[in-house]
Image (tube, grey):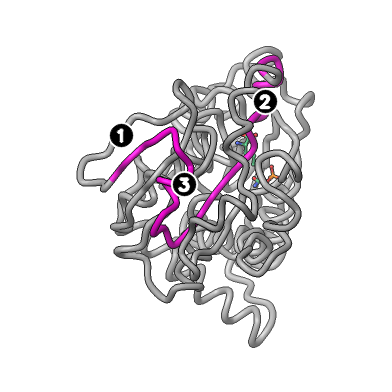
Amino acid sequence: MAEKLDFISIASSRQETLLHVLEVAKRLKKQRKETGQNDLLASGGGGKVLACIYEKPSLRTRVSFEMAMFQLGGNAIYISPNEIGLGTRESAPDVARVLSGMVDGIMARVFEHQKILELAEHALVPVINGLSDYSHPCQAMADIMTIEEHFGKLAGLTLAYIGDGNNVARSLMAACACFNMKFRMAAPPGYGLEKELPGLDFAITPEPRDALRNADVIYTDTWVSMGQEAEKEKRMAAFQPYQVNAELLKAASRHAVVMHCLPANRGLEITDEVIDGPRSVVFQEAENRLHFQKGLLAVLLCGA
Ligand code: CP
Ligand code: NVA
């Protein structure tokens, strides 16, 4: 039996796998737009089933995984934050063992990244990281898909991330390394990222204008991620100069696009004028969560 394939982080994935998933995602997106349904996951006794575990809220991740499974002819089971009690009512390894006997794949959104690692280690079926405190790889890959759609290429482009060195920033940095893009970052001292990836063209600065000069993609995310609510006041003060607004964008290239993984705190990390403005590709980016996830599920659950 072939070894199961998980999707835990960009950095722990093989470049050729990511490229293959992207190709499948692009093909499925095109097919969907042109001909409608593609039921790759329908065969085999009523269709494949994905268990979706949530310790935190979600709009995009939940709807995109559920729709991806439905559109491919399979099913998704939503498991609410209180239902399992991952690590309290029941250990992550036991949850992994039980679900492996009943479903074809597990997607989990968790607080501690360690829980994803434990699920993956003990599950006999593929495990997908739907966001942890450490990484958000499905988001970063949907972003890569969006950037390629917009520019027609990836290699050589520069992504400037303005804001917190969080799960999304870390995954984007790894994606830049994987697809030969440059990564620039502007963050207050203490909130940046360490360059962990060999070969990545990386620079970090406290000055947003320096980061986004000559960038092709300008990216931001919330200053207070889920689970960091106790630090809200301190973070609000530290990040005030990092708002992506029209004034800041005067320093950007004319062709640069603006991205945000959403949900956005309009008026904090990004203004209405920017997110609703001509440079914004955020809703194309959100839709691509569905298309990337379909490629991922097709590859992981049925070896497409
Ligand atoms: N971007 C993203 O993951 O959105 P949700 O938290 O709504 O799933
Ligand atoms: N960094 C954010 C991303 C939300 C999609 C969080 O973890 O809350």
Residue 145 at what x, y percent from top left?
Answer: 49, 64
> What kind of residue is marked 1?
Lys
**Residue at coordinates 76% horizontally, 54% vertically from top-left?**
272
Q: Is residue 65 above or below residue 284?
A: above
Write down the residue under mark 1: 195
Separation of marks 2 and 3 at Cα, in angstroms = 20 Å
Rounded to the nearest whole Å, what is the CA distance between mark 1 and mark 3? 20 Å
Instruction: Determine which of the numbered discs, if any, sits on residue 236 in the image.
Output: 2
Residue 16 seen by the camera: yes
Amino acid carrying label 2: it is Met
Location of the C terminus (image quadrant):
bottom left
Q: Nearer the viewer, mark 2 or mark 1?
A: 2
Expressed as whole percent of the image width and height from the top left, the position of residue 41 reads: 60, 64
> Magenta includes 205?
yes
- Frontmost residue, 5 versus 17: 17
Determine which residue is flagged by label 3.
209
